[in-house]
Image (cartoon, rainbow, N blue to C red):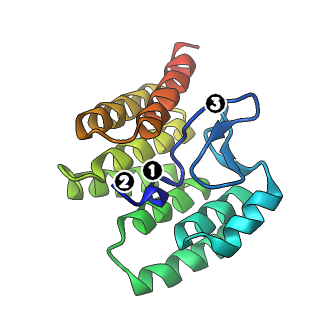
Amino acid sequence: MGDHTAYAIDVASVNREGVGTSVNGVLIDPVTLKPYVADEQAAQHQMQVGSPTDQVMILLARGDLADAGELIAESRLIDPTNAHLRVLDTELTRMQGDFDRAINRLRKLSEEFAGTDYEPLMHHHLGLSFFAKGDFKAAATRFRKAMDLRIELGDDAYLVNASSICLNIAEERAAQ
């Protein structure tokens, strides 16, 4: 896929502050797998020049769920079938604490996008939702599926690494 903003919440690398994302200024907390703003200046710049998916990701990372929801709704009016926005809509649901609803919606999306370039994205986000729910074994299963599909599709190495890193974190938590 050419549009890497589709993977706004996917992780690329781990450092001591968190897990890198494709959105400048945003990292993923390696303990909770939730996004947070690590560099406010970079995030503010990305808010000005980034895509709506980048902007939603930053709003979610800031904990500004109401504004994120509004931007998702406005953007989906323009492009209601946009897979990226549909995933971020489920991410908002997850961050609002409704894990079962996010999981159910992502299961439907993974069926809808089965066999497409978006299928790994759906499984990755299912992993994030299962992780948030505390079902680390199910999270690991979904991260593994996302990683395997990404390898099969020849996705960029950072996307394969994203699922691999999350898989390792979920497996570590499942073993505790």
Residue 138 lies, with reference to residue 79, above or below; the image says above
Distance between mark 2 and mark 3 Cα atoms: 25 Å
Q: Residue at x 36, y 79 (%)?
A: 80
* Residue at the disc numbered 3: 14
Residue occupied by mark 2: 106
Q: Earlier in the sequence, mark 2 or mark 3?
A: 3
Describe the element under mark 3 as helix, strand or loop.
Answer: loop
Give the alpha-carbon distance from disc 3 to disc 1, as whole Å. 28 Å
Dot 1 alpha-carbon crowd within 10 angstroms: few under 14, some 14 to 19, many 20 or more: some
Q: Amino acid at mark 2?
A: Leu
Q: Look at the picture and state if 3 lies above or below 19.
A: below
Q: Position of residue 54 (x, y in %)?
A: 58, 64
Label 1, secondary structure: give it: helix
Are the residues at dot 2 and dot 3 in contact (C-beta closer than 8 Å)? no
Q: Residue furthest top?
A: 175
Left or right placement of residue 26 versus residue 130 in this view = right
Residue carrying label 1: 100
Q: How many marks?
A: 3
Could you tell me which residue is drawn at 65 percent across and 49 percent down?
A: 35
Instruction: State which quadrant residue 49 falls in.
Output: bottom right
Name the spot of residue 21 as percent of width and height, x first.
59, 46
Mark 3 / mark 1, whichever is N-terminal: 3
What's under tag 1, amino acid-wise? Answer: Asp
- Observer-nearest residue: 39 or 96? 39
Q: Name above or below for residue 119 compared with residue 16.
A: below
The residue lying at 36 percent from left, 50 percent from top is 122
